[in-house]
Image (cartoon, rainbow, N blue to C red):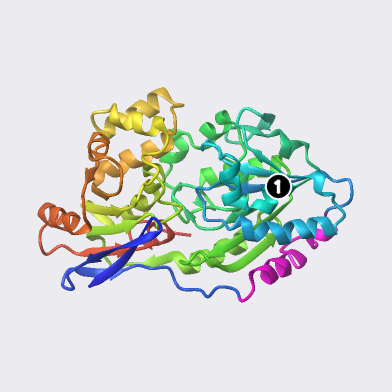
Amino acid sequence: MIINLPYGETNLEIDVPEENLLCVLRTKERPKVDDEEEAILESLKDPIGTPPLVDLVDRGDEVTVVVDDNTRACPDDVLLPPLLDEIARGGVEEEDVKILIAYGLHPHLDEEGQIDLLGEEIVKEYRVINHDPKETVRLGTSSRGVPIEVNRHVVESDFNISTGFIEPHLFAGFSGGRKSIMPGVSSREAIYGNHGFKFIDDPKSIPGCYGENPVYLDSLEHSKAADLNFILNVLLNQEKEITKVVSGDPVKAHLEGVGLVKEETFMEVDNNADIVVTTNNGAPLDLDLYQTVKGIYHASLVAREGGVIISASECGDGVGPDSFEDLHRSSSSPQEIIETIEREEPLGVQWQNQILAELQKHHKILLKCEVDDEILKDMMLEPVDTLEEGLELAFEEVGKDADILVMPEGPMVIPNVRCGRE
């Protein structure tokens, strides 16, 4: 059976023998809204848990709108025009609106990158600010002992709004909502606390879990302390089209969106597979190896112990953060990486090293990407030139009668086999 897999802006094909194919896991299809602008405006005028946005802001208010960076598929170029129009209808002057890009610890975009992200008109007419983890204000400490330190523009604003895209997240349950604040516009120290070894190691820090997830619950405290007043979040289909808009109260609106995402992404599977073929859902999420860990992690949820994971992820921007590459390449085994993080944290982007190393303890990982083969080998990954080569190597590892499961959308699907889900 020939199956198409997203790979950057294109697709790859893999031919899986029918006799080996266990199943193909895809998200449930949801049609796009008929009119995106109308759907956004309707949501803003009838939000969840709050009065209409136009009634929440007033002339003289300083308003900060927090938006995702380029590692997320959130269509801010579509969301911002109607959102900014509603803010203006409430009486807020253009010069009193700031648009803050929530990078967390990701690298900044230049003006051209901002235009690609937000649209030229927005960048030219509004003050667009790159979040700097050093420009934060201390607001206290969370109940889990994590410092709450948030970008000063948010703290100094009269009203804070965040946009976002709700999808499964490998250790925070789901994206969107409070994640715009933590880690989006938080300090380095705060992010290390929320993404620390013990939080990531917690069995509830998994995709789809939020009620008992320490990463999620801690980030909620950060968003409340920062006075995140209102969110505008969307759900997207495989074509990156808006299927649903939720806005209003940062917790209530987000959870309504999460409920819809759960319906689309939770998939019941009877058996673990010997081989799982996955992706990172194409651009923009498969821009580097750092992000690619997400799709590999989701595949691990349905791969048997000792099974093989084959990932197709373009990684056109390379490995990602230098610290991510350096920690893996300087270590002799996955266990050494985990012990180093536990002993020496904070280290670089340790959470992604920790997750990848844990996966490497249990699965052989083959990768079709554009990263140099020697780098992949140094990171204890096995490069393949084609997916056909990957299948042949996987068969050699686990046998020609292996059960194969394919996840074309990678991190968008949460298979429910070995882990309970809320």
From the top left corner, tell me how far across and down residue 365 is, in percent. 24, 47
Give whichever of 218, 330 is nearer the camera. 330
Q: Which residue is mark 1?
A: 124
From the top left corner, tell me how far across and down residue 338 is, in percent. 33, 32
Position of 416 relative to 98 (above/below)? below
Looking at the rendering, the stretch of residues picked out in magenta corresponds to 34-56
Position of 140 relative to 36 (above/below)? above
Tell me what residue is drawn at x 27 percent, y 56 percent. Answer: 303
From the top left corner, tell me how far across and down residue 240 is, in percent. 50, 64
Count of labels in the image: 1
Q: Please give left or right for residue 66 compared with residue 417 in the image.
A: right
Find numbered disc 1 in the image and state the secondary structure of the residue it sits on.
Answer: helix
Tell me what residue is drawn at x 31 percent, y 38 percent. Answer: 357
From where the camera sits, is residue 353 visible?
A: yes
Q: Is residue 43 magenta?
A: yes
From the top left corner, tell me how far across and down residue 37 is, in percent. 68, 68
Q: Is residue 38 magenta?
A: yes
| Callout 1 amino acid | Lys
Q: Please give left or right for residue 24 compared with residue 317 in the image.
A: left
On the rendered image, what quadrant is the N terminus found in?
bottom left
Tell me what residue is drawn at x 43 percent, y 37 percent. Answer: 351
From where the camera sits, is residue 145 visible?
A: no
Q: Please give left or right for residue 372 compared with residue 100 in the image.
A: left
Q: Please give left or right for residue 329 compared with residue 341 in the image.
A: left
Q: Residue furthest top?
A: 344
Mark 1 surroundings within 10 Å by alpha-carbon count, few (fewer than 14), some (14 through 19), many (20 or more): few
